[in-house]
Amino acid sequence: MFRKALVAATVLLAAPASAETPESLMRGYAEQARTTSASYAGPSPAAGRRLFHQQPRDWSCATCHTDQPAATGRHAITGKTIAPLSPVANPERFRDAAKVEKWFKRNCTDTLGRLCTSAEKADLISFLLSAQGGT
Amino acid sequence: MRTRSGICRIDWIVWSIAAVFLAHAAVAAVPPNQAIEPDAYAEECGACHTAYPARLLRPADWTVVLATLDRHFGVDASLDATALAAVARQLDVDPAVASAATTKATPRITQQGWFREEHDEISAQQFRSPAVRSAANCNACHAGADRGQFDEHSVRIPR
């Protein structure tokens, strides 16, 4: 009988975990960065902020998301309203790893003209979670 | 006996909790192609612009739009195969054709004859005003655009 209860408890614990959080996604990217560089120092909000405003071509992140990531943004071309990017202001952000990857791919290509590295992704999320990125 | 029935009850409670939890997990873990189906178009395309109703372009034009998403009006709007197939189905075009490469230019809704005719009293300046910004921003004047409603009587042109 005890064994049965133990099996049930194990099944309970092994069930899928809830959705990701911005913090868990940031840690995941940081771990990826660490595997490629032993000297990686961890996510940096300051580096994330620089990345957010970097504009080597037509657009930076701020072009559509404004220079305050907690504010409502607007698509530079279509004029469509964009809900706040910062998870501090918008709890729906950074909850789904596949969705986050899709948007990093699209938006890093559109702004920087290349894919972002895992370290840059961790930096950006740490900026959006910081006091500066969350206001 | 009393001890035995007590253990049985605990066992039953633990199994019930596990069953409820697993049922919840099963609902959350719907296969991707099913989960993405209902709102794939609104989710994938409607994030950047109005979810233009399928009737605004011919199916052959939508096919070209979907086949050129990697260079979609200057941005990379490419989708993975599952999302592309779901969006194609919603736009009533063949997913296989939509994923085939093409060199054709992406068709524009704003260059269709009916669009020009319906908007012939709107100046280029009005389309470029700060409140509208682009003819692609249907919602600026048609409040029901995201629901596919473009009734002429409910048009409000922002000043």
Image: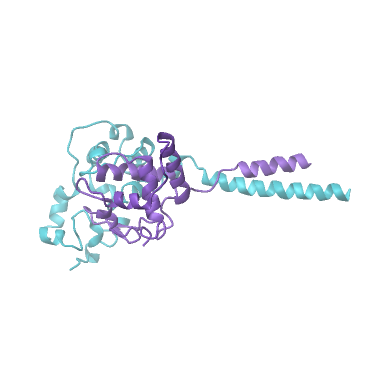
Seen in the image, is A68 located left or right of residue B22?
A: left
Seen in the image, is B73 located left or right of residue B4?
A: left
**Which residue is at the front of the view, B131 or A61?**
A61
Whether residue A74 is visible, yes or no, is yes
Q: How is the image coloured?
A: by chain
Which residue: 71% across, 48% down? B14
**Which residue is at the front of the view, B13 or A48?**
A48
Q: Position of residue B84 (x, y in %)?
A: 34, 39
Q: Position of residue B66 (x, y in %)?
A: 27, 39
Count of marks placed on residues: 0
Which chain is represented by purple in the image? A
Q: Position of residue B36 (x, y in %)?
A: 42, 44
**Which residue is at the front of the view, A37 or A82?**
A37
Q: Position of residue A86 (x, y in %)?
A: 38, 56
State the quadrant of the C terminus of chain B.
bottom left
Seen in the image, is A100 located left or right of residue B25?
A: left
Which residue: 87% across, 51% down? B2
Q: Quadrant of residue A108?
A: top left
Whether residue B151 is visible, yes or no, is no
Which chain is represented by cyan in the image? B
**Which residue is at the front of the view, B76 or B64?**
B76
